[in-house]
Amino acid sequence: MREDYGFVNTREEIEKNEAETLAPFAALSRDSRGRKYAEEDHPFRTRFQRDRDRVVHSAAFRRLEYKTQVFVNHEGDHYRTRLTHTIEVAQISRTIARGLRLNEDLAETVALVHDLGHTPFGHAGEEILDDLMKHHAGQGFNHNQQSLRVVEHIERRYPDYDGLNLTYETREGIVKHETDYDVPEADEYDPSLNATLEAQIVNFADEIAYNCHDVDDGLFSDVISRDEIMDIDIWHELYQQSCERYPDLTRSKRQYHIIRMMINREVTDLIYTTAKKLHDEKITSLDDVRRSKNRLVGFSDDLIEQNRVLKSFLMEKMYRHTRLIRMTNKARRILTKLFEAYMDDPRQLPAKYCAQATDGAKPQVICDYIAGMTDRFAILEYRKLFDPYERV
């Protein structure tokens, strides 16, 4: 037994502080449903804090640095990657959680883990693997489900089990993550029940991050013109406010200022709108959250409409731009050729994957291997397999 010096912040003290300061509908660390494999609690870290640390130390998390958000990594060092996007989602999630007196550690953890299953080449890569898996295995590909595979099976860092052995609440946050690009498949996690509010706010933090930062990257790359985006109400309104407050800003500072204002507007709107819904629905416990038939987290009607217009603009002017269409088609050729080459001869896979690639398991093993690739590794592997002048 160690001596108590009176100022050491133990796990028990952190859990006590959560119970005393968080809202009654927040997810408390001490009330977690636990892990698949029982473990002793840590003396200084709560269960959700340990989840966060395991995610950050995982190989899959590190590889996000070289996975596409919108622009392929070799386009330039300025653009967001899947890693910087994830960090931005985590920061926004913590701000929202703090504003609603939710568990910041759980919100941050769900944000950090939500994209671990993403493919190289962004959403284009996910669509390609979905088509390939439907053709070769009779089932598709979903990056939420792949994220769950990563943390339950693919990561192998601990002596007693495969995976990261994360808490139920974190794993539930993965499979119930839902944005315009995600379709939840939560059969093992009781789809009749909602996820925690901490997991739900990550859905919106994700949307805030990619809307605002895709605009930023689009303007920086000149894929989006400054004249075009002035027709979008939310941008035009914030542009005028920025000019009134800072009339002499340079073009780059003006852009950064407006992006900051956009994020602030969206986060503030989400916090106040969600707080009102929680009050009006008389939500007083986590059980109330899970059983609610109405959406508890969301934007105001005005901001929903403004975001709809902005997303339509990004789809038309950015995601369907010639540069991105070409990238998508390159990605399709690269990933399709890799998948088919490994299917034809699994001996071209690394030894540990080759050993697992038996007839029935072969498509899933190949899918796991390709989904874990970074953009640049996929390009290099393509060259090694198909360029006769590239060393293998």
Image (spheres, rainbow, N blue to C red):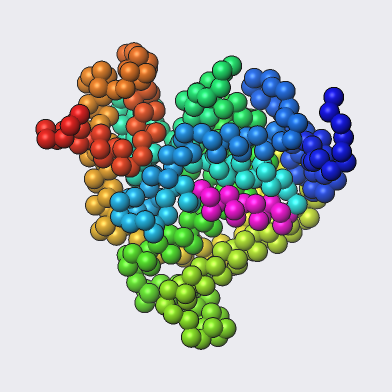
Asked if residue 275 is positioned above or below residue 2 in the image, the reply reads below
**Could you say which is closer to the camera, residue 241 or residue 133?**
241
Asked whether, in this view, residue 285 is left or right of residue 292, the answer is right
**Magenta residue span:** 86-100
The x and y percentages for residue 58 are 51, 33
Q: Residue at x 40, y 64 (%)?
A: 313
Q: Quadrant of the N terminus?
A: top right
The x and y percentages for residue 312 are 42, 61
Evaluate whether residue 38 shows in this view. Answer: yes
Farthest left residue in view: 388
Magenta stretch: dominant secondary structure: helix
Q: Is residue 368 magenta?
A: no
Q: Residue at x 56, y 64 (%)?
A: 263
Q: Residue at x 22, y 21 (%)?
A: 344
Asked if residue 265 is positioned above or below residue 28 in the image, the reply reads below
The x and y percentages for residue 168 are 65, 30
Asked whether, in this view, residue 22 is left or right of residue 260, the answer is right
Asked whether, in this view, residue 185 is left or right of residue 227, the answer is right
